[in-house]
Protein backbone atom coordinates (compact mmCIF):
# COMPACT_ATOMS: atom_id res chain seq x y z
CA UNK A 1 0.00 0.00 0.00
CA UNK A 2 1.19 3.52 -0.85
CA UNK A 3 0.93 6.39 1.62
CA UNK A 4 -0.44 8.63 -1.08
CA UNK A 5 -1.57 8.19 -4.65
CA UNK A 6 -1.44 11.37 -6.70
CA UNK A 7 -3.70 11.64 -9.73
CA UNK A 8 -2.21 13.76 -12.51
CA UNK A 9 1.40 14.59 -13.35
CA UNK A 10 0.98 18.29 -14.09
CA UNK A 11 3.11 20.64 -12.03
CA UNK A 12 0.75 20.60 -9.03
CA UNK A 13 0.65 16.79 -8.89
CA UNK A 14 4.39 16.47 -9.37
CA UNK A 15 5.11 19.03 -6.66
CA UNK A 16 2.69 17.29 -4.29
CA UNK A 17 4.45 13.98 -4.95
CA UNK A 18 7.90 15.47 -4.48
CA UNK A 19 6.99 17.23 -1.21
CA UNK A 20 5.32 14.07 0.13
CA UNK A 21 8.27 11.92 -0.89
CA UNK A 22 10.68 14.34 0.79
CA UNK A 23 8.67 13.91 3.99
CA UNK A 24 9.31 10.16 3.84
CA UNK A 25 5.99 9.07 2.34
CA UNK A 26 5.68 6.29 -0.22
CA UNK A 27 4.10 7.90 -3.29
CA UNK A 28 2.85 6.96 -6.72
CA UNK A 29 1.73 9.40 -9.44
CA UNK A 30 -0.84 8.13 -11.93
CA UNK A 31 -1.12 10.12 -15.16
CA UNK A 32 -3.51 9.73 -18.10
CA UNK A 33 -1.23 11.11 -20.80
CA UNK A 34 1.95 9.61 -22.15
CA UNK A 35 3.98 12.50 -20.75
CA UNK A 36 4.32 14.59 -17.60
CA UNK A 37 3.55 18.34 -17.56
CA UNK A 38 -0.20 18.59 -18.27
CA UNK A 39 -0.74 22.15 -19.52
CA UNK A 40 3.02 22.58 -19.78
CA UNK A 41 4.00 21.08 -23.11
CA UNK A 42 6.99 21.94 -25.24
CA UNK A 43 7.66 20.44 -28.66
CA UNK A 44 10.86 20.77 -30.70
CA UNK A 45 10.75 22.30 -34.16
CA UNK A 46 11.22 19.70 -36.90
CA UNK A 47 13.91 21.99 -38.34
CA UNK A 48 15.84 21.82 -35.06
CA UNK A 49 15.55 25.62 -34.83
CA UNK A 50 14.13 25.77 -31.30
CA UNK A 51 11.24 24.75 -29.07
CA UNK A 52 7.59 25.76 -29.12
CA UNK A 53 5.66 26.06 -25.86
CA UNK A 54 2.12 24.95 -26.68
CA UNK A 55 1.04 25.60 -23.10
CA UNK A 56 2.74 27.63 -20.37
CA UNK A 57 5.78 29.67 -21.34
CA UNK A 58 6.34 32.89 -19.39
CA UNK A 59 7.84 33.22 -15.92
CA UNK A 60 9.20 35.92 -13.63
CA UNK A 61 12.37 35.32 -11.65
CA UNK A 62 11.67 38.19 -9.25
CA UNK A 63 8.08 37.35 -8.33
CA UNK A 64 7.77 33.57 -8.70
CA UNK A 65 10.07 31.96 -6.18
CA UNK A 66 9.28 28.27 -6.73
CA UNK A 67 9.62 28.30 -10.51
CA UNK A 68 12.81 30.33 -10.15
CA UNK A 69 14.30 27.94 -7.60
CA UNK A 70 13.73 24.95 -9.91
CA UNK A 71 15.05 26.87 -12.92
CA UNK A 72 18.27 27.49 -10.98
CA UNK A 73 18.42 23.95 -9.57
CA UNK A 74 18.02 22.43 -13.04
CA UNK A 75 20.39 24.98 -14.62
CA UNK A 76 17.78 26.16 -17.14
CA UNK A 77 18.69 29.07 -19.40
CA UNK A 78 16.12 31.84 -19.79
CA UNK A 79 15.57 34.76 -22.10
CA UNK A 80 13.89 38.08 -21.32
CA UNK A 81 10.83 39.28 -23.21
CA UNK A 82 12.00 41.71 -25.90
CA UNK A 83 10.15 45.02 -25.54
CA UNK A 84 11.85 47.39 -28.01
CA UNK A 85 9.69 48.57 -30.88
CA UNK A 86 6.17 49.62 -31.74
CA UNK A 87 3.04 47.77 -30.65
CA UNK A 88 -0.14 47.64 -32.71
CA UNK A 89 -3.80 47.86 -31.82
CA UNK A 90 -6.27 46.47 -34.31
CA UNK A 91 -9.82 47.78 -34.09
CA UNK A 92 -11.22 46.01 -37.15
CA UNK A 93 -10.00 44.41 -40.38
CA UNK A 94 -8.71 47.63 -41.90
CA UNK A 95 -8.52 49.90 -38.85
CA UNK A 96 -5.30 49.72 -36.88
CA UNK A 97 -2.84 52.02 -35.22
CA UNK A 98 0.68 51.78 -33.95
CA UNK A 99 1.73 53.02 -30.53
CA UNK A 100 4.89 52.97 -28.41
CA UNK A 101 4.85 49.75 -26.40
CA UNK A 102 3.93 50.21 -22.73
CA UNK A 103 1.61 53.21 -22.91
CA UNK A 104 -2.17 53.47 -23.11
CA UNK A 105 -3.02 53.55 -26.82
CA UNK A 106 -4.25 56.96 -27.92
CA UNK A 107 -8.01 56.90 -28.04
CA UNK A 108 -9.89 60.17 -27.73
CA UNK A 109 -9.10 62.03 -24.45
CA UNK A 110 -12.47 60.96 -22.95
CA UNK A 111 -11.97 57.33 -23.95
CA UNK A 112 -8.43 57.31 -22.55
CA UNK A 113 -9.65 58.86 -19.28
CA UNK A 114 -12.44 56.29 -19.04
CA UNK A 115 -10.10 53.36 -19.70
CA UNK A 116 -7.52 54.61 -17.20
CA UNK A 117 -10.21 55.17 -14.56
CA UNK A 118 -11.48 51.58 -14.91
CA UNK A 119 -7.95 50.14 -15.06
CA UNK A 120 -6.94 52.04 -11.91
CA UNK A 121 -10.13 50.95 -10.14
CA UNK A 122 -9.49 47.25 -10.83
CA UNK A 123 -5.81 47.62 -10.01
CA UNK A 124 -6.58 49.27 -6.63
CA UNK A 125 -9.24 46.70 -5.80
CA UNK A 126 -6.97 43.80 -6.76
CA UNK A 127 -4.25 45.11 -4.46
CA UNK A 128 -6.57 45.21 -1.43
CA UNK A 129 -6.31 42.07 0.67
CA UNK A 130 -10.04 41.65 1.22
CA UNK A 131 -12.00 38.48 0.45
CA UNK A 132 -13.99 38.53 -2.81
CA UNK A 133 -17.35 40.20 -2.23
CA UNK A 134 -20.65 38.34 -2.90
CA UNK A 135 -22.12 41.43 -4.58
CA UNK A 136 -19.24 41.44 -7.09
CA UNK A 137 -19.64 37.68 -7.57
CA UNK A 138 -23.30 37.88 -8.58
CA UNK A 139 -22.58 40.15 -11.56
CA UNK A 140 -20.55 39.62 -14.72
CA UNK A 141 -17.47 41.71 -15.32
CA UNK A 142 -19.42 43.55 -18.01
CA UNK A 143 -22.28 44.43 -15.64
CA UNK A 144 -19.78 45.54 -13.01
CA UNK A 145 -17.95 47.80 -15.48
CA UNK A 146 -21.14 49.29 -16.87
CA UNK A 147 -22.13 50.26 -13.34
CA UNK A 148 -18.79 52.02 -13.00
CA UNK A 149 -19.49 53.95 -16.21
CA UNK A 150 -17.25 52.06 -18.64
CA UNK A 151 -17.62 53.18 -22.27
CA UNK A 152 -17.60 50.91 -25.35
CA UNK A 153 -13.82 51.21 -25.95
CA UNK A 154 -13.08 50.39 -22.32
CA UNK A 155 -15.40 47.39 -22.39
CA UNK A 156 -13.73 46.16 -25.56
CA UNK A 157 -10.28 46.56 -24.00
CA UNK A 158 -11.18 44.74 -20.77
CA UNK A 159 -12.74 42.03 -22.94
CA UNK A 160 -9.35 41.55 -24.63
CA UNK A 161 -7.71 41.29 -21.20
CA UNK A 162 -10.29 38.71 -20.09
CA UNK A 163 -9.82 36.66 -23.25
CA UNK A 164 -6.04 36.85 -22.94
CA UNK A 165 -6.14 35.90 -19.26
CA UNK A 166 -8.83 33.22 -19.16
CA UNK A 167 -10.11 32.46 -22.65
CA UNK A 168 -13.53 33.79 -21.63
CA UNK A 169 -15.33 37.07 -22.32
CA UNK A 170 -16.55 39.72 -19.89
CA UNK A 171 -20.19 38.61 -20.07
CA UNK A 172 -19.23 35.04 -19.11
CA UNK A 173 -17.84 35.26 -15.58
CA UNK A 174 -17.99 37.19 -12.39
CA UNK A 175 -16.27 40.42 -11.49
CA UNK A 176 -15.27 38.96 -8.11
CA UNK A 177 -13.51 36.00 -9.76
CA UNK A 178 -11.66 38.29 -12.18
CA UNK A 179 -10.56 40.73 -9.49
CA UNK A 180 -9.53 37.97 -7.08
CA UNK A 181 -7.51 36.29 -9.83
CA UNK A 182 -5.60 39.55 -10.26
CA UNK A 183 -5.24 39.73 -6.45
CA UNK A 184 -3.40 36.41 -6.34
CA UNK A 185 -1.09 37.65 -9.12
CA UNK A 186 0.18 40.92 -7.59
CA UNK A 187 -2.63 42.99 -9.20
CA UNK A 188 -4.08 43.60 -12.66
CA UNK A 189 -1.04 45.48 -13.97
CA UNK A 190 1.28 42.67 -12.99
CA UNK A 191 -0.83 40.08 -14.82
CA UNK A 192 -0.53 42.17 -17.98
CA UNK A 193 3.06 43.37 -17.66
CA UNK A 194 5.84 42.12 -19.95
CA UNK A 195 8.71 43.59 -17.91
CA UNK A 196 10.17 42.59 -14.55
CA UNK A 197 6.96 43.66 -12.75
CA UNK A 198 4.78 41.05 -14.43
CA UNK A 199 3.98 37.50 -15.43
CA UNK A 200 5.21 37.78 -19.05
CA UNK A 201 8.82 38.67 -18.29
CA UNK A 202 10.96 35.67 -19.25
CA UNK A 203 10.85 32.32 -21.03
CA UNK A 204 12.98 29.21 -21.00
CA UNK A 205 15.36 28.92 -23.95
CA UNK A 206 14.45 25.26 -24.43
CA UNK A 207 10.88 25.47 -23.22
CA UNK A 208 8.92 25.16 -20.00
CA UNK A 209 8.67 21.37 -20.30
CA UNK A 210 12.07 21.20 -18.66
CA UNK A 211 10.39 22.04 -15.34
CA UNK A 212 8.05 19.02 -15.11
CA UNK A 213 10.74 16.81 -16.62
CA UNK A 214 13.19 17.93 -13.93
CA UNK A 215 10.65 17.40 -11.17
CA UNK A 216 9.80 13.93 -12.49
CA UNK A 217 13.49 13.01 -12.23
CA UNK A 218 13.62 14.27 -8.64
CA UNK A 219 10.60 12.13 -7.73
CA UNK A 220 11.98 9.11 -9.58
CA UNK A 221 10.43 8.16 -12.89
CA UNK A 222 9.65 4.66 -11.56
CA UNK A 223 7.08 6.27 -9.21
CA UNK A 224 5.22 7.92 -12.09
CA UNK A 225 2.85 5.72 -14.08
CA UNK A 226 2.01 7.20 -17.50
CA UNK A 227 -0.83 6.18 -19.86
CA UNK A 228 -3.05 5.34 -16.88
CA UNK A 229 -6.27 7.41 -16.96
CA UNK A 230 -8.16 7.23 -13.69
CA UNK A 231 -11.72 5.93 -13.99
CA UNK A 232 -12.75 5.77 -10.32
CA UNK A 233 -11.74 6.62 -6.77
CA UNK A 234 -13.19 4.82 -3.79
CA UNK A 235 -12.64 6.14 -0.28
CA UNK A 236 -12.92 3.22 2.21
CA UNK A 237 -12.26 5.49 5.24
CA UNK A 238 -9.02 3.76 6.28
CA UNK A 239 -7.63 3.65 2.75
CA UNK A 240 -8.41 4.67 -0.83
CA UNK A 241 -8.47 2.63 -4.02
CA UNK A 242 -7.95 4.25 -7.38
CA UNK A 243 -8.79 2.30 -10.52
CA UNK A 244 -7.56 3.11 -14.01
CA UNK A 245 -9.26 2.55 -17.35
CA UNK A 246 -6.43 0.11 -18.09
CA UNK A 247 -7.63 -2.09 -15.23
CA UNK A 248 -4.96 -1.32 -12.63
CA UNK A 249 -5.79 -0.53 -9.03
CA UNK A 250 -3.66 1.56 -6.68
CA UNK A 251 -4.24 1.39 -2.92
CA UNK A 252 -3.08 4.17 -0.62
CA UNK A 253 -3.86 5.81 2.69
CA UNK A 254 -4.54 9.16 1.02
CA UNK A 255 -5.31 10.43 -2.46
CA UNK A 256 -4.36 13.79 -3.95
CA UNK A 257 -6.44 14.74 -6.98
CA UNK A 258 -4.56 17.24 -9.15
CA UNK A 259 -6.76 17.38 -12.25
CA UNK A 260 -8.71 20.58 -13.05
CA UNK A 261 -11.96 20.63 -11.02
CA UNK A 262 -14.04 20.81 -14.23
CA UNK A 263 -12.92 17.22 -14.92
CA UNK A 264 -13.93 15.73 -11.53
CA UNK A 265 -17.32 14.82 -12.98
CA UNK A 266 -15.56 12.54 -15.50
CA UNK A 267 -14.37 10.34 -12.63
CA UNK A 268 -16.56 8.01 -10.62
CA UNK A 269 -15.91 9.09 -7.03
CA UNK A 270 -17.42 7.01 -4.22
CA UNK A 271 -18.83 8.02 -1.81
CA UNK A 272 -20.02 10.96 -3.85
CA UNK A 273 -18.47 14.31 -3.04
CA UNK A 274 -20.59 16.47 -0.72
CA UNK A 275 -23.31 18.38 -2.59
CA UNK A 276 -21.69 21.83 -2.26
CA UNK A 277 -18.43 20.42 -3.68
CA UNK A 278 -20.34 18.79 -6.53
CA UNK A 279 -22.28 21.96 -7.24
CA UNK A 280 -19.23 24.17 -7.36
CA UNK A 281 -16.96 21.82 -9.34
CA UNK A 282 -19.66 20.56 -11.73
CA UNK A 283 -20.18 24.16 -12.77
CA UNK A 284 -16.65 25.44 -13.25
CA UNK A 285 -15.80 26.11 -16.88
CA UNK A 286 -12.57 26.18 -18.84
CA UNK A 287 -11.96 28.87 -21.44
CA UNK A 288 -11.10 28.65 -25.10
CA UNK A 289 -7.40 29.29 -24.73
CA UNK A 290 -5.51 28.40 -27.89
CA UNK A 291 -2.12 29.12 -29.34
CA UNK A 292 -0.97 29.53 -32.91
CA UNK A 293 2.83 29.74 -32.89
CA UNK A 294 4.21 30.94 -36.19
CA UNK A 295 7.96 30.29 -36.55
CA UNK A 296 10.23 32.13 -38.98
CA UNK A 297 13.75 32.12 -40.31
CA UNK A 298 14.22 35.76 -39.25
CA UNK A 299 12.29 38.18 -37.00
CA UNK A 300 11.09 40.14 -40.04
CA UNK A 301 8.67 42.31 -37.99
CA UNK A 302 11.60 43.90 -36.17
CA UNK A 303 12.96 45.28 -39.45
CA UNK A 304 9.74 47.27 -39.59
CA UNK A 305 10.37 48.43 -36.00
CA UNK A 306 7.53 46.36 -34.54
CA UNK A 307 8.16 44.45 -31.32
CA UNK A 308 5.65 41.76 -32.26
CA UNK A 309 3.09 42.68 -29.60
CA UNK A 310 -0.46 43.48 -30.64
CA UNK A 311 -3.96 43.47 -29.25
CA UNK A 312 -7.01 43.10 -31.42
CA UNK A 313 -10.68 43.94 -30.87
CA UNK A 314 -11.66 42.49 -34.22
CA UNK A 315 -10.36 41.84 -37.72
CA UNK A 316 -9.28 38.28 -37.00
CA UNK A 317 -9.46 35.56 -34.38
CA UNK A 318 -6.22 36.44 -32.54
CA UNK A 319 -6.82 38.54 -29.40
CA UNK A 320 -3.22 39.20 -28.46
CA UNK A 321 0.25 38.17 -29.65
CA UNK A 322 3.85 38.43 -28.52
CA UNK A 323 7.30 37.91 -29.97
CA UNK A 324 8.30 34.55 -28.47
CA UNK A 325 11.72 34.32 -30.11
CA UNK A 326 14.84 33.09 -28.37
CA UNK A 327 17.54 35.11 -30.16
CA UNK A 328 20.28 33.24 -28.28
CA UNK A 329 19.53 30.05 -30.25
CA UNK A 330 18.23 31.60 -33.48
CA UNK A 331 14.57 30.72 -32.84
CA UNK A 332 12.10 33.35 -34.09
CA UNK A 333 8.37 33.15 -33.56
CA UNK A 334 5.17 35.04 -32.91
CA UNK A 335 2.87 33.43 -30.37
CA UNK A 336 -0.76 34.28 -31.14
CA UNK A 337 -3.46 33.68 -28.52
CA UNK A 338 -6.70 32.72 -30.26
CA UNK A 339 -9.04 32.90 -27.31
CA UNK A 340 -12.64 33.39 -26.23
CA UNK A 341 -15.56 32.99 -28.66
CA UNK A 342 -13.45 33.59 -31.80
CA UNK A 343 -11.07 30.96 -30.39
CA UNK A 344 -13.91 28.44 -30.15
CA UNK A 345 -14.86 29.02 -33.80
CA UNK A 346 -11.21 28.97 -34.90
CA UNK A 347 -10.55 25.74 -33.01
CA UNK A 348 -13.44 24.05 -34.83
CA UNK A 349 -12.38 25.12 -38.31
CA UNK A 350 -10.12 23.20 -40.72
CA UNK A 351 -6.35 23.51 -40.27
CA UNK A 352 -5.90 25.40 -43.56
CA UNK A 353 -8.62 27.85 -42.52
CA UNK A 354 -6.99 28.33 -39.13
CA UNK A 355 -3.62 29.10 -40.70
CA UNK A 356 -5.09 31.45 -43.30
CA UNK A 357 -7.02 33.35 -40.62
CA UNK A 358 -3.90 33.88 -38.50
CA UNK A 359 -1.56 34.77 -41.38
CA UNK A 360 -4.09 37.21 -42.91
CA UNK A 361 -4.53 38.90 -39.55
CA UNK A 362 -0.76 39.15 -39.03
CA UNK A 363 -0.43 40.65 -42.52
CA UNK A 364 -3.05 43.31 -41.76
CA UNK A 365 -1.49 44.12 -38.41
CA UNK A 366 2.11 44.38 -39.56
CA UNK A 367 1.34 45.93 -42.98
CA UNK A 368 3.04 43.02 -44.70
CA UNK A 369 3.70 43.14 -48.43
CA UNK A 370 2.82 40.17 -50.69
CA UNK A 371 6.50 39.14 -50.81
CA UNK A 372 6.98 39.44 -47.03
CA UNK A 373 8.60 36.61 -45.08
CA UNK A 374 5.32 36.57 -43.13
CA UNK A 375 3.87 34.31 -45.83
CA UNK A 376 6.77 31.84 -45.57
CA UNK A 377 6.78 30.52 -42.01
CA UNK A 378 9.24 27.76 -41.20
CA UNK A 379 6.69 25.92 -39.10
CA UNK A 380 3.30 26.60 -37.51
CA UNK A 381 2.07 24.97 -34.31
CA UNK A 382 -1.58 25.10 -33.34
CA UNK A 383 -2.83 24.00 -29.97
CA UNK A 384 -6.54 23.87 -29.13
CA UNK A 385 -6.71 23.01 -25.44
CA UNK A 386 -10.48 22.39 -25.50
CA UNK A 387 -9.77 19.40 -27.74
CA UNK A 388 -7.41 17.81 -25.21
CA UNK A 389 -9.34 15.10 -23.43
CA UNK A 390 -7.39 15.54 -20.18
CA UNK A 391 -7.50 19.34 -20.13
CA UNK A 392 -10.73 20.37 -21.92
CA UNK A 393 -9.62 23.98 -22.05
CA UNK A 394 -7.54 26.44 -20.12
CA UNK A 395 -6.31 28.50 -18.30
CA UNK A 396 -7.83 27.43 -15.01
CA UNK A 397 -11.40 26.46 -14.09
CA UNK A 398 -13.63 29.51 -13.60
CA UNK A 399 -16.66 29.44 -11.26
CA UNK A 400 -20.28 29.97 -12.20
CA UNK A 401 -21.74 33.35 -11.19
CA UNK A 402 -22.09 33.55 -7.41
CA UNK A 403 -20.34 30.24 -6.69
CA UNK A 404 -16.92 31.70 -5.91
CA UNK A 405 -18.11 33.32 -2.70
CA UNK A 406 -21.03 30.94 -1.95
CA UNK A 407 -18.79 27.85 -1.86
CA UNK A 408 -15.54 29.35 -0.59
CA UNK A 409 -15.72 27.20 2.57
CA UNK A 410 -15.89 23.96 0.53
CA UNK A 411 -13.88 24.59 -2.61
CA UNK A 412 -10.53 22.78 -2.48
CA UNK A 413 -11.00 21.57 1.10
CA UNK A 414 -10.21 17.89 1.85
CA UNK A 415 -13.09 15.39 1.80
CA UNK A 416 -12.35 12.22 3.79
CA UNK A 417 -9.06 10.88 2.44
CA UNK A 418 -9.27 12.99 -0.71
CA UNK A 419 -7.18 16.14 -1.06
CA UNK A 420 -7.37 18.60 -3.94
CA UNK A 421 -4.55 20.51 -5.62
CA UNK A 422 -4.14 22.44 -8.85
CA UNK A 423 -3.22 25.95 -9.88
CA UNK A 424 -6.87 27.00 -9.45
CA UNK A 425 -6.58 26.62 -5.66
CA UNK A 426 -3.46 28.71 -5.21
CA UNK A 427 -3.46 32.03 -3.42
CA UNK A 428 -0.19 32.92 -5.16
CA UNK A 429 -0.04 33.11 -8.96
CA UNK A 430 -3.26 31.21 -9.47
CA UNK A 431 -3.54 30.07 -13.10
CA UNK A 432 0.23 29.97 -13.52
CA UNK A 433 2.95 27.34 -13.16
CA UNK A 434 3.99 29.02 -9.91
CA UNK A 435 0.43 28.60 -8.60
CA UNK A 436 0.46 24.90 -9.49
CA UNK A 437 3.68 24.38 -7.53
CA UNK A 438 2.35 26.38 -4.60
CA UNK A 439 -0.87 24.38 -4.44
CA UNK A 440 1.01 21.08 -4.75
CA UNK A 441 3.19 22.02 -1.80
CA UNK A 442 0.17 22.93 0.35
CA UNK A 443 -1.78 19.80 -0.60
CA UNK A 444 1.16 17.57 0.29
CA UNK A 445 1.54 19.33 3.63
CA UNK A 446 -2.15 18.67 4.43
CA UNK A 447 -1.55 14.97 3.82
CA UNK A 448 1.71 14.90 5.77
CA UNK A 449 0.06 16.63 8.76
CA UNK A 450 -2.95 14.27 8.75
CA UNK A 451 -0.81 11.16 8.49
CA UNK A 452 1.42 12.43 11.31
CA UNK A 453 -1.64 12.53 13.57
CA UNK A 454 -2.82 9.05 12.54
CA UNK A 455 -2.06 6.00 14.71
CA UNK A 456 -0.17 4.20 11.96
CA UNK A 457 1.85 7.12 10.70
CA UNK A 458 5.39 6.20 9.73
CA UNK A 459 6.82 9.68 10.08
C1 LIG B 1 -1.95 28.01 -23.71
C2 LIG B 1 -1.50 28.14 -22.27
C3 LIG B 1 -0.63 29.16 -21.94
C4 LIG B 1 -0.18 29.29 -20.62
N1 LIG B 1 0.75 30.25 -20.34
C5 LIG B 1 1.31 30.28 -19.12
C6 LIG B 1 2.45 31.10 -18.88
O1 LIG B 1 2.94 31.77 -19.79
N2 LIG B 1 2.99 31.08 -17.63
C7 LIG B 1 2.49 30.30 -16.63
O2 LIG B 1 3.06 30.30 -15.53
N3 LIG B 1 1.41 29.50 -16.83
C8 LIG B 1 0.82 29.47 -18.05
N4 LIG B 1 -0.21 28.61 -18.30
C9 LIG B 1 -0.85 27.92 -17.18
C10 LIG B 1 -0.09 26.70 -16.68
O3 LIG B 1 0.15 25.83 -17.74
C11 LIG B 1 -0.95 26.00 -15.64
O4 LIG B 1 -1.32 26.91 -14.62
C12 LIG B 1 -0.30 24.82 -14.92
O5 LIG B 1 0.51 24.09 -15.79
C13 LIG B 1 -1.39 23.96 -14.32
O6 LIG B 1 -0.86 22.86 -13.63
P1 LIG B 1 -1.84 21.90 -12.86
O7 LIG B 1 -1.01 20.83 -12.26
O8 LIG B 1 -2.70 22.68 -11.94
O9 LIG B 1 -2.85 21.29 -13.95
P2 LIG B 1 -2.58 20.43 -15.27
O10 LIG B 1 -1.33 20.87 -15.93
O11 LIG B 1 -3.85 20.49 -16.06
O12 LIG B 1 -2.33 18.94 -14.71
C14 LIG B 1 -3.36 18.02 -14.53
C15 LIG B 1 -2.84 16.65 -14.93
O13 LIG B 1 -3.87 15.68 -14.68
C16 LIG B 1 -3.91 14.78 -15.76
N5 LIG B 1 -5.23 14.16 -15.81
C17 LIG B 1 -6.41 14.69 -16.20
N6 LIG B 1 -7.39 13.79 -16.10
C18 LIG B 1 -6.82 12.63 -15.64
C19 LIG B 1 -7.32 11.34 -15.35
N7 LIG B 1 -8.61 11.00 -15.50
N8 LIG B 1 -6.44 10.40 -14.89
C20 LIG B 1 -5.14 10.70 -14.70
N9 LIG B 1 -4.62 11.91 -14.98
C21 LIG B 1 -5.45 12.87 -15.45
C22 LIG B 1 -3.60 15.64 -16.97
O14 LIG B 1 -3.17 14.87 -18.07
C23 LIG B 1 -2.52 16.56 -16.42
O15 LIG B 1 -1.23 16.02 -16.61
C24 LIG B 1 -0.66 28.42 -19.61
C25 LIG B 1 -1.56 27.41 -19.95
C26 LIG B 1 -1.97 27.26 -21.27
C27 LIG B 1 -2.88 26.14 -21.63
Image (cartoon, rainbow, N blue to C red):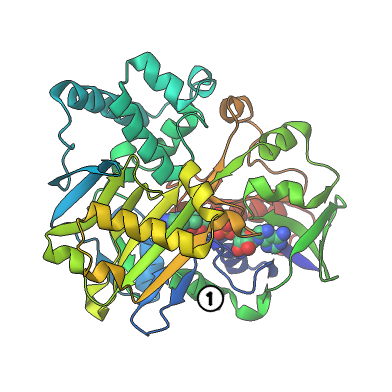
User: Which quarter of the figure is the N terminus placed in?
Assistant: bottom right
Which residue lies under the disc numbered 1?
Answer: 218
Name the side, left or right, on which 327 lies relative to 7. left
Across and down, in percent, residue 315 comes to: 34, 44
- 11 lies above or below 76: above
- Label 1 sits on a secondary structure element that is helix
* Quadrant position of ligand 1: bottom right
Task: Residue 227 in the image: state x and y as whole percent.
Answer: 70, 73
444 on left or right of 271: left
Q: In which quarter of the image is residue 162?
A: top left
Q: Quadrant of residue 349?
A: bottom right
**Residue in view at x 35 percent, y 26 percent:** 125
Question: Does any portion of residue 449 appear in the rendered image?
Answer: yes
- Residue 368 in the image: state x and y as whole percent: 21, 60
Residue at 61% of width from left, 53% of height from top?
392
Q: Would residue 440 appear left or right of 152 to someone viewing this image?
A: right
Which residue is found at the position 65% from the left and 56% from the top? 448
Frontmost residue, 160 versus 51: 160
Quick check: 166 above or below 159? below
Amino acid sequence: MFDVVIIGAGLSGLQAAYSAKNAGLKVVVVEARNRVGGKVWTVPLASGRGYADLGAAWINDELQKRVTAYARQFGLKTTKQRLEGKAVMQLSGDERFEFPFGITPEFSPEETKNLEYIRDHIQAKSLRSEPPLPEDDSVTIEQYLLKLGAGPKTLAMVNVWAKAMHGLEIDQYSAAWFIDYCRTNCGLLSVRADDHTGGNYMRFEKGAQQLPNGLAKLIGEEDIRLNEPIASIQDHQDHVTVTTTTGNTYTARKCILSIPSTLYKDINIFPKLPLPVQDVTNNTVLGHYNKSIVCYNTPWWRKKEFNGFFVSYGGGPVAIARDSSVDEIGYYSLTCFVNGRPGEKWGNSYPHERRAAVLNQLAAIFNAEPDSELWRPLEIFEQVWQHERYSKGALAPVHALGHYTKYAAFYGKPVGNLHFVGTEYSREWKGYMEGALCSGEIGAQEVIDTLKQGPTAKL
